[in-house]
Image (spheres, coloured by chain):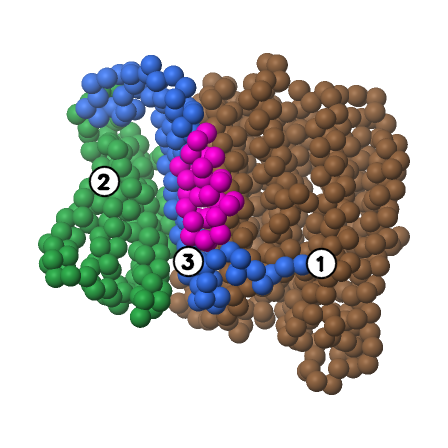
Amino acid sequence: MIGNAPYIVVGFIIFLGLYTAIFKRNLIKIVMGITLVESGVNLFLITLGYRTGGGAPIFTQATNMHMVLPTPQALTLTSIVIGVATTALMLSFIVMIYKHYKSIDAKDVRRLKG
Amino acid sequence: MNFTEHIPILVIALPLFAAFLTPLMGKISRKAPRYFATAVFVIVAFLVVLLANMVYSRGTEPIIYTLGSQNDTIFRIVLEIDAFSIFMALIMAIVSLAVSIYSWAFVDKYSGQDKFYTLLLLVAVGSYGMVLTGDMFNLFVFFEISSIALCGLVAFRTERGESFEAAFKYMAYSTISGLLLLFAVGIFYSQYGVLNIAKIAEGVGSGPFNELNKIALGLLVTVFALKAGSVPFHMTTPDAYSEAPGGVAALYVAASQAGLYALFRTCFTIYRPVITTETIGWVVIILGVLSMFVGVTMALVQKDIKRLMAYHAISQTGYMLLGVGVGIAVLGNPAALDAYGKMAMEGGIFHIINHAMYKGLLFLTAAAIFYRVGTRNLNEMRGLAHTMKFTTIFFMIGALSIAGIPPMNGFSSKLMIYESVYQFSPILSAIAMLVSVLTLASFVKVFYSAFMGPKNEKVDAKEVPMSMLVGMAILTGVIIVFSLFPGLVVDTIIKPAVEALLHGWPIAGGM
Amino acid sequence: MMSKIVRSMTRPLYPFIILFGAYLVVHGHLTPGGGFQGGAVAASAIALLVVAYGGTRMFRKGTLTAMESSGLIVFISLAMVGMATVFFYNFLANGGPIFGEAIFYGPNPGYFNTAGVIPLMNMAVGLEVIGGLGVIIIALGKKAFEVME
């Protein structure tokens, strides 16, 4: 019923995230772009497991035995946990970069080159 | 059930367990974490050797260990260990042990010793996991563990802004590449409904080479080439190598080679049946040639000793990609594979272990120089051979080996690559030799400016502490053994690894 | 330091947030939720306190890191105890002293005392996530307050 719409949304979100990560100069915006890519990939995994009309794959108080696939949801959860760790780490790097460089603009943060 | 059957998981679980015990060890005394972590690395190295013994006695059939239960193995997380996996694990075992001992003296002046060793153990967990797993999603998880822990280590020196800059860059690229890897895993899952690598390989081989699998192959090659630091994706590699504190750069070499492992595993195990044309082989070869050439030319102009070595690391990665790439290119042609393809792969794979040893050693000597002199700029150092005698000897052994001077191990593997690649395409072989000459030139420059000349009276460059010397001596010992008995090494560990790669993986258990 | 409204609402609310987090952790094997989700909810109470009262001194970082380490150690130990059969083997399911009731296949009202080591692992992960996210929030919050001043 929903057809290919989720995949188009996935493509759009990933594209938007990559665009933000590549073309923005503010480091926090770069992290936001990476988070968008992550959301897109998570949506992709969830969509793979969706079955039309399926309910949550939980037996407790279940009324609908037609269920969506649980494995992609487990994968997504792991990916979200890893995403929390990477996002927090990158944000703390930005805090420290700001402390040392007094700027979070990518064009000022380039002492390493050559 | 006896103990030896659990060795595969213990190699991963023991450092993981120890990584979280290390902060508690830090509460006992200041020096407890380092001894504890080193003891764990010794035990893990011992377990890896035991496991290697088991793997080699079984021939090409991999050891399969299932987590959770022994029923329904196809849907469970499995570890599949063949001769190539254990070969990579051996590299990690040697390098992590050397780095762990080397870092005793290095971390002495920093406050976060327990955290340093926790991260060191986690890098080892990530790399062991990447090379031992038989599950596509687990590969992603361990990829992220190793990337995140390495980023933490790169940013270890909090007093420097540059280390955060390098760590942020590396983190951004590795996170995006990790997500692309996850996307590829999703593509496989959507088609075959499994995450088991052997089962995916069966699915890929049973149908035509469809568009989805082509997209997945492109993503996987990109992601793992980025992890390995090959040229079009080398934006962060020199920064991260040069900012990695002390011996961590040596560990970084071994950890990034897990990316090479995954790249070769993708081409040989998953896509083996559908690679009948030379296209993918040529892609890997071109990545390799570009890495060799761009790496060495960038290295020639560097003044920062660690940055120079980082570009050489990129350039040496090119040799491995070239050797194995020739093997991939002739996969569809059994006659050529037997004539020179296997030898090219042996050369490339032999070069992986040689590179980890001599480049690890060179990074350790660079860190030793930085530890005493306090600068990485080659123009500001001179005459170190007067006072740092052992470091000079270790540097010479490493430099001779990386330049491929005849008795050293670097020469044995490079000769195998030259000979076999010449039969495939003479021009590639000529480029490889030219790069080798440029490498020699570059290291002669470093040796001359850092170690030769009159003594520098301004800096107190005495010999580095004992633990650093021991760390370097471990790697030097391995290099000397490999230089004296190259034939033996090739027969014992390299040939089984190539056979295992070409053989592929059987499906683990039944449904 | 936020306004008085936020502060006085935080005080009665945060125990309930932690309680809801604990509920999600403990019922992780029956309903949506589990270690990470419950831990994240409980850690949001820490975030609320940090934002409302503007201080990071009310939590000791040592306690939180100890929680993080011990949660992970318990998790891996449970997996290793299963190694009498294989790593991660569920040795308590269907007959263990706790959480050992037979697992009912199909729709059911939710039997709490089932699933073996899974609830225990959920609790270990919950502890670890509260500790880990708490440290992250406090470390970032501290820097943010430093920058603001």
What secondary structure is found at the residue carrying circle 2?
helix
Q: Residue at x 30, y 24 (%)?
A: A57
- Which residues are drawn in magenta? A11-39
Q: Residue at x 43, y 25 (%)?
A: A8
Residue behind mark 1: B309
Residue behind mark 2: C24
Location of residue C12 (image quadrant): bottom left
Location of residue A49 (image quadrant): top left
What secondary structure is found at the residue carrying circle 1?
helix
Categorize mark 2 by other alpha carbons within 10 Å: few (<14), some (14-19), many (20+). Answer: many
User: Chain C hue?
Assistant: green
Between circles 2 and 3, the one closer to the viewer is: 3
Residue B480 can be seen, yes or no = no
What secondary structure is found at the residue carrying circle 3?
helix
Image x and y of residue B70, in percent: 45, 27
Magenta: main secondary structure equals: helix
Q: Which chain is brown?
A: B
Disc 1 marks a residue whose amino acid type is: Met
Q: Residue at x 80, y 61 (%)?
A: B443
User: Chain A hue?
Assistant: blue
Between circles 2 and 1, the one closer to the viewer is: 1
Report how far apart the C-alphas of labels 2 and 3 lie in the structure.
28 Å
Residue behind mark 3: A92
Residue A92 can be seen, yes or no = yes
**Image marks 2 and 1: residues in contact by CB distance under 8 Å:** no
